[in-house]
Image (spheres, grey):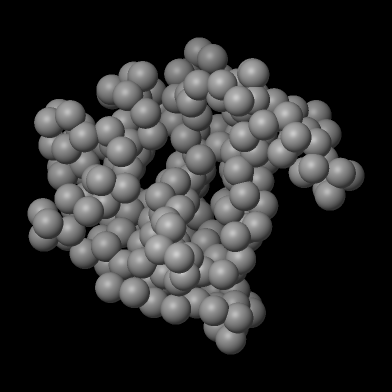
């Protein structure tokens, strides 16, 4: 199913009217990627003295009842947030999604990559409000943003099953969630900058220049 959240969508009404119980929402920040283009672990890169993973946690916290880091509990230990390990270490972001869904007690779970510091509350709120078993941003050209999506915890058993059968790509898993009887809703987005990843030293420099 597709929803169009173009320029005419009123973000402000959703946010200003959001006097709601967030206890059934959780946010999860995925770490542990190879960061080969950056040359160092992106999650721990400091911007103005704050690790990138915690800056991303700051961005999602306004719409989540809790925020947790997913990754190596020793490497990513910090005084602010709980860290939960992957059950399938080294198997990519789908394993991180599985770990989040295995650990959660919330029905709705926002799962994001650790290198997306420009996420905004209005867009994230739209994903929560979309309903369905999974809500994923999609651009007009069909490209998805699979590492900024909301998953209902009922997706866990299917995600784990897919990992156990060798699936590793999140986009493939989304397709197979649908064939497994779960509803994936795609929300049309226009603001690509909201989901910008910091993949290279150049990306990092441009982000610092724009947020100095």
Q: Nearer the viewer, residue 129 or 193?
A: 193
> What percent of the width, then of the height, locates residue 191?
61, 66
Quadrant for residue 138, please give it: bottom left
Q: Residue at x 67, y 31 (%)?
A: 200
> What percent of the width, then of the height, locates residue 202?
75, 35
Quadrant for residue 134, please give it: bottom left
Q: Quadrant of the C terminus?
A: top right
Query: Relative to 59, does residue 130 appear above or below in the rendering?
Result: below
* Residue reaching furthest to the front: 141
Q: Is residue 209 left or right of residue 44?
A: right
Q: Is residue 66 left or right of residue 86?
A: right
> What percent of the width, then of the height, locates residue 192?
60, 60
Query: Relative to 71, does residue 184 appear above or below in the rendering?
Result: below
Residue 78 in sight = no
* Residue reaching furthest to the top: 74
Residue 71 in sight = yes
Q: Quadrant of the N terminus?
A: bottom left
Q: Residue at x 42, y 69 (%)?
A: 187
Q: Residue at x 38, y 71 (%)?
A: 130
Q: Is residue 170 left or right of residue 128?
A: left
Q: Nearer the viewer, residue 145 or 97?
A: 145
Q: Nearer the viewer, residue 25 or 162?
A: 162
Query: Relative to 109, does residue 164 appear above or below in the rendering?
Result: above
Q: Residue at x 69, y 26 (%)?
A: 45
Q: How many marks?
A: 0
Q: Nearer the viewer, residue 15 or 130?
A: 130
> What percent of the width, then of the height, locates residue 33?
48, 26
């Amino acid at each position: 199913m597709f929803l169009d959240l173009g320029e005419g969508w009123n973000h402000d009404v959703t946010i200003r009217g959001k006097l709601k119980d967030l206890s059934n929402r959780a946010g999860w920040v995925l770490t542990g990627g190879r960061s080969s283009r950056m040359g160092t672990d992106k999650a721990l890169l400091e911007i103005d003295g704050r690790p990138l993973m915690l800056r991303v946690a700051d961005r999602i916290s306004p719409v989540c009842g809790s925020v947790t880091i997913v990754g190596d509990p020793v490497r990513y230990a910090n005084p602010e947030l709980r860290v939960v390990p992957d059950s399938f270490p080294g198997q990519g972001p789908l394993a991180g999604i599985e770990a989040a869904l295995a650990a959660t007690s919330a029905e709705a779970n926002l799962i994001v990559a650790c290198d997306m510091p420009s996420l905004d509350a209005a867009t994230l709120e739209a994903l929560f409000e979309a309903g369905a078993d999974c809500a994923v941003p999609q651009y007009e050209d069909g490209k998805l943003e699979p590492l900024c999506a909301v998953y209902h915890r009922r997706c866990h058993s299917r995600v784990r099953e897919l990992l156990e059968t060798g699936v590793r790509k999140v986009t493939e898993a989304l397709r197979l969630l649908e064939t497994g009887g779960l509803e994936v809703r795609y929300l049309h987005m226009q603001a690509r900058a909201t989901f910008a990843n910091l993949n290279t030293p150049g990306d990092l420099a441009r982000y610092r220049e724009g947020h100095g």
